[in-house]
Amino acid sequence: MDDELNRSVEDVVIEVLVHLPVKSLMRFRCVSKSWWALIRSPDFATMHHHRRGSKEIMSETCSLMLKRFLVSGKTGDDELYLGTHALSFHDPYSPELSSDDDHVFVPLGDVYSPEFLEIYGPCNGLVVLVRADSFIWCNPTLREFKVLPRNTIPVPKGYVCRLEEFGFGFDADTNSYKFVSIVKVMEQPTHYHTFSWEEDSYVRTDLYDSSTNSWRIIDTELPDFGCMPECNLFFNGAQHWMVSDHHVDKILCFDVGREVLKWILHPPSLCDYRHDGKLGMALVSLKQSLAILRYSYESDSEDCIDIWLLKEYGVSESWTKQFVIGPYPTGHDILARCSWQDQWILFESDGQLVAYAIHANQIKTFQFHGHATSFQAVIFRESCVSLNQVLLI
Amino acid sequence: MARKNRNPVGKNVDPEAQKKKTRTLTLKSSDGQEFSISESAAVLSIAIENMVEDDCAGGVIPLPLVDGGTLARVITYLNKHAEDGASDEEKRKFDEEFVSGMEMGVLFDVVLAANYLDIRGLLREVRRRIADRMKNKSVEWVRKTFHIESDFTPEEEEQMKKEFAWAWEGVDSDVDD
């Protein structure tokens, strides 16, 4: 009977701990060795990340990582602001973001040309900051940063690599994180020439595996494609990018577990509008489906935002135009991947952060400003996965 | 808590449900106290429902892991949630008041009972309440409340504290609320 009671106490303690914010957990690791071992175990981290909580708990554990540029008061130069802000849903009709004062700046050290810094993710609450060819893996909740080992896969003499697309995801079968970078290998440009795709150029897919701590080449054959900025999303075990292949827009996906590339075609009705004015597109996850958003960034006008859902994953024929929202004032830039609780989509509009409601004609404005088009953001759920534990480097 | 009432009132009265309302069961706590409860309220506990279905209940259902005081509280909860015509809003308010006055030790007894008896709604409510009360507490408070003795050396503890110093910001004082 005592055993049964002890087991039951243990179960209940785990149940309670799973519902605590990461900040409390990091403190309570000190309670005892058994709590320490429990909280740092990968199974616990998974349970914690995927727990289904009440609204109150959700509101404490969802955050926004926001990048923007502002003119610095001190130097008068453009300065990078990168921080995380807690999201709260106490009132579902009016989400709130914690103010500037609460936010945590990401210590990037001496960031040379920060305008090239891009945020990728999230996957299990983790993000990657990409700057030139260095990848900074980050658990924003734990404020942990790890620079991935440099990709040293050689290129033929006289050639150089240029990073085209990047993504990362978790492979549950091998319990490892995989980082994929698609590079174009092209001849070293001579003076006054820029990179150009020649007959002997080729596309290579490189992968870094956290379990083997090494880079390797994935056997793929890709044509010379064009990238669309910020159109990437980790969803359903695969990294997705919106690309343009000989003027046809498609979605390129990399299945992180099977390590294969696949294509998903766009909905035909989306392609009709392609050359019709200044249209932007983005990939988001909405209602448990992969979704494409199309919006206008023509200034001083009003337009609707169209949303297609891929009803059956991987089946291009299953695209359905599900929502038309707005019209909203245009001249905005979507913050890719940012949909909230299937209710809100985040945009930057004239240098300000705004959210548009999907189900009602509603706009929520936040007091976050920056240079127009300098915004980038991801929404993540907090995670107690320690990078130091995953990556033994 | 937007859960649908399990026994909607008005439409097609199920004779079996009616019978459950009038049939009573006796629950016996670890310290030998006996409590009467309608079957319809008792079966909100999946564990009791299983015992009733397996007909191993006999006359009295012994619950050797639940003491009398805790069982009385659990029965108050079950009765409210089995009440005809109690709206979701009413139940939500009841839940709020039900747990708000309880001390941590009592909450823990109730959550253990809810876990053992498999009463999902109660488990969720009390678990949330415990997590809410714990989240801003100090390590010492947690040890005292859960009767845990530290097996770390002060040096080890200091090291861990240094590693995640931000997690020690904004901790409440050690007064139970």
Image (cartoon, grey):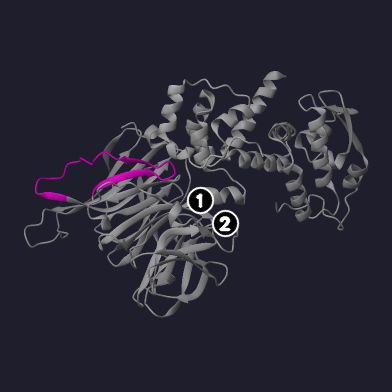
Observer-nearest of A170 and B175: B175
- Mark 1 vs 2: CB contact within 8 A: yes
Q: Which element type, helix, strand or loop, lies under badge 2?
A: loop
Q: Is residue B153 above or below residue A133?
A: above
Amino acid type shown at disc 2: Phe
- In the rendered image, residue B25, in percent from the top left (x then y), is placed at 89, 34
Residues at discs 1 and 2 both on one chain: yes
> Magenta region: which residues?
A133-160
Q: Which residue is mark 2?
A: A89
Compare marks 1 and 2 and give the one earlier in the sequence. 1
Q: Count of labels shown?
A: 2
Q: Is residue A193 above or below residue A60?
A: below
Write the residue at 34% across / 43% down: A137
Q: Which mark is residue B151?
A: none
Q: Chain of mark 2?
A: A
How many neighbours does mark 2 have within 10 angstroms: few (below 14), some (14-19), or many (20 or more)? Answer: some
- In the rendered image, residue A133, in percent from the top left (x then y), is placed at 24, 48
Q: Which mark is residue A62?
A: 1
Name, please, the residue furthest toward the left.
Answer: A191
Q: Quick one: quadrant of the N terminus of chain A? A: top right
